[in-house]
Image (tube, helix red, strand yellow):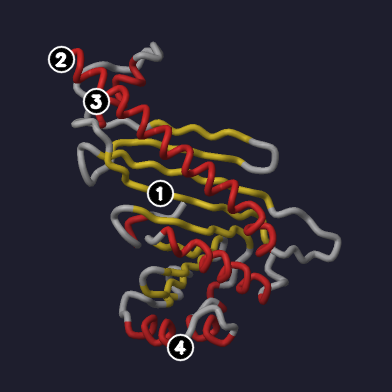
Amino acid sequence: MPDAEVTTPREAYFVVVSGSMNPAIHSPQWYRVIGAIDETELQSSLRIPTNSTTSFSSQVQFGTPPLIVTCQPEQWWIQSGDVASWPRMLEVASLVFAKLKETPLASFGLVMQRHIETDASDTKSVLAASLTELNLGLPKGKSTGSTITLSVVEQDYEATASLQPSYLSERSVFVLYQRQYEVPKAPSGYVDLGDLVKARFDQFRLGSQTVCTDIVAAVNTRAAKKAKSNG
C-alpha cells in the first residue's frame, strides 16, 4: 500500500483502486474538467513543483494538502492526512471511475494509518514482551523493534491489521488497518465503484476505530501492570 509519509507524519487515509489504469488520463486539468477539483485546487496543484508526470516512472501524482491523487499503471489512489476528508475522497473516487467506465477494475481498498500515543514509556518492549509470551520460540532480549500483522478473510473482503512501535515517539504505536474488496463482475461490464465504496465505508470506519481503541487499551493495560510490578 502507499506510504503515509507523503501526507502527514501522524495519520493518513486512502481509497485505493486496482485495475488496468492509464496514468496519462489522470491530470489535474482533466480532474478540473469533470468537476473532481475546483479552480483553486487546480492552480495549487500546478504551482507545486513536486507534482509532476514522468514517462519514465509511469506515475502521475498531483494535489495539495489535504488531498493527493496518484495513478500508476496498475493502481490509483487518493489520500489525505485529515480524517475529515473521507467524504471528499469517496466522492472524487466515485466521480473519476464513473467517467472512466471502460477501465477494467479488479479490487478496491480502504486504508487507515495512524501514529497513536499510549501510556507505555517504551512500546518496543511492550510489544516484544507480548509476542514472547506466545511461546513461539522467538528471540528474547532488549527489543529493537517488533511488528505484528494479521490478515483474515471475511465474507466479502480481506482485512489486514498491523501494529508496530512508532518512529515518531517511544510512547507511540503505528497502526495500519485496511480492507480490500474484489470488484464483482457485471453482465454489462460496468460496475458503479462509487456505490460499492460508499456502501462499505461505515463498516470499515467502525472496524478501524475498534482496532485503534482496542490496541491502545491493551498496550496501556500492559504498561500499567509493568509499572505496578516495578513499583
Q: Nearer the viewer, mark 2 or mark 1?
A: 2
State the mark number for residue 39. Answer: 4
Q: Amino acid at mark 3?
A: Ser
What residue do we see at 19% from left, 31% from top? Answer: 121
Image location of residue 193, percent across then percent down:
67, 63
The reply to whether discs 2 and 1 touch (Cβ–Cβ < 8 Å) is no
146 relative to 105 in the view: left or right: left
Residue drawn at x 21%, y 42% is: 169
Classify mark 1: residues with Cα within 10 Å, few (<14), some (14-19) or many (20+). Answer: many
Nearer to the camera, 225 or 4: 225
Which residue is at the far left? 231
Whichever of callouts 3 and 2 sits on the residue coming sooner in the sequence is 3
Residue at image mark 3? 125
- Measured Cα–Cα span from mark 1 to mark 3: 21 Å
* Amino acid marked by disc 2: Asn
Where does label 2 land, which residue? 230
